[in-house]
Image (spheres, coloured by chain):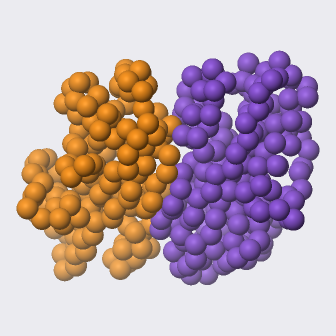
Chain colours: A orange, B purple
Amino acid sequence: MIILASKSPRREEICRLIGLEFEIIPAKNECDIDLTVAPEEAIRKVAEAKAQEVFRAHSKDIVIGADTAVYACGEFLGKPKSEQEAFQMLKKLSGKTHQVFTGVSIILENQKVSFCEKADVEFSELTDSEILEYIASKDPMDKAGAYGIQGKGAKFVQRINGDFYTVMGLPCARLYNELKAFDVF
Amino acid sequence: MIILASKSPRREEICRLIGLEFEIIPAKNECDIDLTVAPEEAIRKVAEAKAQEVFRAHSKDIVIGADTAVYACGEFLGKPKSEQEAFQMLKKLSGKTHQVFTGVSIILENQKVSFCEKADVEFSELTDSEILEYIASKDPMDKAGAYGIQGKGAKFVQRINGDFYTVMGLPCARLYNELKAFDVF
């Protein structure tokens, strides 16, 4: 069996897109990001910790863990805890290019692969009223960096350099190709 | 009233994403691509012709026309006419970077803006059996270049440089920003 150790509906959608058959058993522990290492390594380690946690209870299965982080002006932006924090985050992203990192870890009994993909995301210059209107839609509140590239936040993203699905939460092509080594495809 | 002069369900979805209220009245004429000019200009002109055609019958409205083309190894790839042609197109895209151009034209009685956005799309190396399986899903058959980045074709796209929605058929952020000049937002 393949287990997706994430409760993100976007990751579920991406796994269906590549034709995966899987069950969802989310990791429960919150993992702190290790700020002493490079962002790629830090996010890869969080993905590994999530996959490991679920693998410990399902050691006969293939477990996929993932973590996505928005990195702007030298700091990670998590999910906003309030509308005020969402506003501050979107102000920070406005008119600039930031990075999105998605770490992925795939674990089977005798096999493991972990990686982290990066995408650059260029935001339009946003007015305060555009930000407030977007926050009123509730779309930002459950998303790292306070926006979703596949939803109402799409109109703010001028261009990306990387895999769109890395920004959405799971690098689709890389995951598909890595899973071949696990005889999934 | 705002009219989207396209019957593409993907363009309809993108217009809804930016919160547009509109009706769909597709252009009927097939426009040839002018091969004597640069790709950007050629595709912008097709978008203009589509918008103009619908605008002639709806001259009190704002009409949005669009055209998307896949450009690989110096030639445009249209929608495949057969599964065999889809196979040839996907073989051509495999393991290489190609360009997607989406032209957009917005026409109102005394105002017009037309532009063309470009995105680079990097494909994974595909095996013949992957291509055949993808063709069997029917996903490629109604799409320029024989793939859809938002559907089952996603797993073949390693990275893009540009707006994801340009590849999907309508550059979301640019359209949203240009429509501000038409007092739509």
Q: Residue at x 9, y 58 (%)?
A: A34
Of residues B89 and A8, which is closer to you in this image? B89
Q: Residue at x 83, y 18 (%)?
A: B60
Of residues A149 and B177, which is closer to you in this image? B177
Q: Is residue B95 above or below residue B109?
A: below
Based on the displayed image, in which of its 4 quarters is residue A131 positioned? top left
| Spot occupied by residue B169 in the image (x, y as percentages of width and height) | 65, 48
Q: Is residue A94 above or below residue B166?
A: above
Q: Is residue B110 left or right of residue A163?
A: right
Of residues B105 and B31, which is closer to you in this image? B105
Of residues B157 and B102, which is closer to you in this image? B102
Q: Total of numbered circles in the picture?
A: 0
Q: Quadrant of the N terminus of chain B?
A: top right
Residue A45 visible? The answer is no
Q: Quadrant of the C terminus of chain B?
A: top right
Q: Residue at x 60, y 45 (%)?
A: B171
Q: Is residue B107 left or right of residue A182?
A: right
| Spot occupied by residue A13 in the image (x, y as percentages of width and height) | 42, 49
| Spot occupied by residue A116 in the image (x, y as percentages of width and height) | 28, 66
Q: Is residue A167 left or right of residue B145?
A: left
| Spot occupied by residue A48 in the image (x, y as percentages of width and height) | 17, 64
Based on the displayed image, in which of its 4 quarters is residue A142 positioned? top left
Q: Is residue B33 above or below residue B185?
A: below
Residue B34 visible? The answer is yes
Q: Residue at x 18, y 75 (%)?
A: A109
